[in-house]
Amino acid sequence: MNRNNLTKDIDNVFNFNPGADLSCIMVIFGGTGDLTHRKLMPALYNLQCEKKLPYHFAVVSVGRRDKNNKEYRYEVHDSIRSFARFKINEQTWGQLRQRIYYEKFNFAEDDGYTRLDTFLKKLDDQYQTGGNRIYYLAVAPEYFDVIVEKLHRHGMARNTGSWQRVVIEKPFGRDLPSARILNEKITAVFTESNTYRIDHYLGKEMLQNIMVIRFANMLFEPVWNNQFIDNIQILSCEKVGAGSRAGYYEQAGALRDMMQNHMLQLLTLTTIEPPASLDTESIRDEKVKVLRSLEQFSPEQVFKNVVRGQYGPGVIDDEEVSGYRQEDRVSPTSDTETFIALKVHIDNFRWAGVPFYIRTGKRMPVKSTEIIIQFKPLPNILFAREYGGLDPNLLVIKIQPKEGIFLQFNAKKPGTENIIVPVQMDFCQNCRPGTNSPEAYERLLYDVMRGDSTLFARWDEVEYSWKFVDHIAAAWKERKPNFPNYAAGSWGPAEAAELLAKDNREWLHAGDISA
Ligand code: BG6
């Protein structure tokens, strides 16, 4: 009985709604772009393999390049072969292929929308999609409001008797004022409940698991507070550089690209209070409370608690790589940060006094995302006194590439002498043979189809995240950084290590701790 209840609860976390009408046409603006080819189409194919795509379904990709359906489908086939987690099966691909269409037009042209509307209505008849639409804006941010306004003007955004949802990729603005303007434009057309602001980290398996780990285990929740926890570190590092996205990245930097969204989402899920229920709004309400309680930095605190960095040339995996300033479409004098590390507090009763150390960067030695919870030192009695201190307990929630949990505790080393050593329990869920975790986009697209916005950012989450980040951006404007200040392949600038050294701590990484 308990087991059944658990399954039911987990379904509730994600508001599983078996009765929802998933029939729809998904319109992808930016159909020839990187995101569509690397993430969206492979996700749709994976959903098809899992028999999760609705029977009444079609995809229309809109792009500015000239090509016909046949050419477009051919390109999509290639992308699926390269990026889908399931090996391509021609029969399954055939079922999806025939439902993919390509339409060429310029996003700012009214004629294009008139043609698109007529075409979508024709497809409604053919696929019995009943007028339901997902508009996925996989385009540069300057087109977000243009497209939304055109959809509105052409009567394609709100219709009775059917649903229309819009999915917005990041960046959602570049600061709070611009995000507000964008939000007003979008929500003047689509309601908040039909607006899906994507943060793909929320679609990752282990992020969804954080709440389950915390609230479904008596072992963890009672000690999840400032009485038992010494500090929490959140790390997301990548080996890749800005690469082909440098044009965008130059404007964003690590602060806007990773901190404002993914890193703060990791922080909120780790620290929220138990929600009143598992429905979408209760969870989001708790997340917002954390964001509202975040310490707001003065300029002096920014210079004390936040470190920025930019990579210079270096070596990764025995290969020489160039510095950020030498990359294509990057200014040779660029001041864009590719690394950020900070220390912040959450000013509420649960977390008062616990420092949160967050760091993210490109061109680092490993690809890894993890949350490391370091428990308080033991009282200086018994074994701790005898052995001159013992290692603290550590719990690591491993998000990627390995998904799982790692727990470090002290135990006696087998033998005739009393030697105490830290030992580790390392649970890796995606290392098990036969486990093939869904890609984040798969989960998120499926949720849009069934109208579940739990794993998407509500406007006030975005708003409070920008508020926090804007203080940092404003202070940084006042001082020119001394870039580059870390070599590609290293763990970031020396100041990042000093940030923790000042507190007698050091950055941890599960890969270094594991035996
Ligand atoms: C994206 C950022 O949102 O996340 C990229 O724009 C970054 O710069 C990427 O590389 C990281 O995602 P993941 O899933 O590979 O950790």
Image: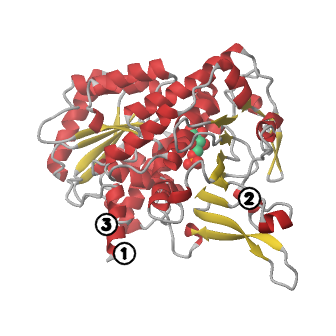
Seen at 50% across and 56% down, the residue is 210
Badge 2: few (under 14), some or many (20 or more) residues near its Cα, within 10 Å?
few
Relative to 73, residue 49 above or below: below
**Regarding ligand 1, which quadrant of the image does it lie in?**
top right
**Image coordinates for residue 141, horizontal then vertical, percent:** 46, 27
Q: Mark 1 or mark 2: which comes first in sequence? A: 1
Q: Which residue is mark 1?
A: 3
Location of mark 3 (residue): 8
Graded by Cα atoms within 10 Å as few (under 14), some (14 to 19) or many (20 or more), the crowding at tag 3 reads few
The mark total stands at 3
N-term mark: 1 or 3 = 1
Would residue 201 be found to the left or right of residue 9 on screen? right
Residue 181 picture location, percent across and down: 39, 19
The residue nearer to you, when weighing 75 against 467, is 467
The residue wearing badge 2 is: 379
Considering the numbered disc 2 on the image, is that residue within a helix, a strand or a loop? loop
